[in-house]
Image (spheres, rainbow, N blue to C red):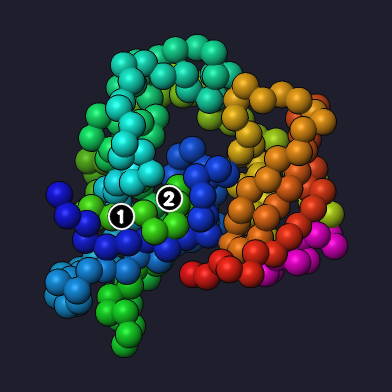
Amino acid sequence: MNKIGTIRTDFPAKFGIPRQSGLVEELKGKIYFEPQYHNMDAFRGLDGYSHIWLLWQFSENMEKTAPISVKPPRLGGNTRMGVFATRSPFRPNHIGLSCVKLEAVEWEEKSGPVITVSGIDLMDRTPILDIKPYLPYVDCHPEATGGFGSQVKDYGLKVVFPADLLAQIPIEKHKAVIGVLEQDPRPAYHKDPERKYGITFAGFDVRFYVKDGVLTVCEIEQKKDFMI
């Protein structure tokens, strides 16, 4: 398979990215396409849909072999489930699938067609393999059961983000960064309340610690080499 484009997001590294699409609605990304798709005819009618499916490549895991079973983070990192019963990033064919909200389909003079999406769970520069429209009448199943995933769907941390630190991040990204932290970026087996963690988001290193279900941001450092 050949990529059709590349998505640009606020996550230069895997750590901190939401484990599912749609968990943080404010997270946005822009998809830029390969030259052969620099024709708006390829996107005719797409703006009639509110959501789309992204098929993409786990490009950071290409050298790793998919295991038969994995330990889902939301089950504490100690319980094994079959790889096909999870959304582990370690897949037999390194293919990811995300349902995202379609915000805009535009033409840029220098870049050609650009699609803006929200609710993303992708790292910056992830290869996009295909795009398909989300069809509510066949893709939505209200009666569906969620397996063990339903046990942890409402998981979240309380976030304390001091105003002076939050002010260092552009205001339009405040809800997004708080939403990311609420999802608890830590590995499931890390429970040390004294340990300091950090995620890189939108050009900032955001450092925090977690104690008694409360995540407290303690430091912010801007990374000057980050560009979207």
Report x, y in % for residue 31. 35, 65
Q: Is residue 164 magenta?
A: yes
73 over 111 or under it: above or below = above
Q: Which residue is mark 2?
A: 122
Q: Residue at x 39, y 29 (%)?
A: 88
Q: Nearer the viewer, mark 1 or mark 2?
A: 1
- Res 94 visible: yes
Report x, y in % for residue 153. 53, 29
75 over 46 or under it: above or below = above
Q: Residue at x 79, y 53 (%)?
A: 219
Q: Which structural element holds mark 2?
A: loop
210 over 161 or under it: above or below = above
At label 1, the amino acid type is Pro
Q: Which residue is mark 1?
A: 127
Sequence-earlier tag: 1 or 2: 2
Q: CA distance from mark 1 to mark 2?
A: 10 Å
Give, as a single range, the part of the protein colored magenta: 163-171
Q: Residue at x 29, y 46 (%)?
A: 57
Q: Residue at x 78, y 47 (%)?
A: 217
Q: Return the mark for residue 212.
A: none
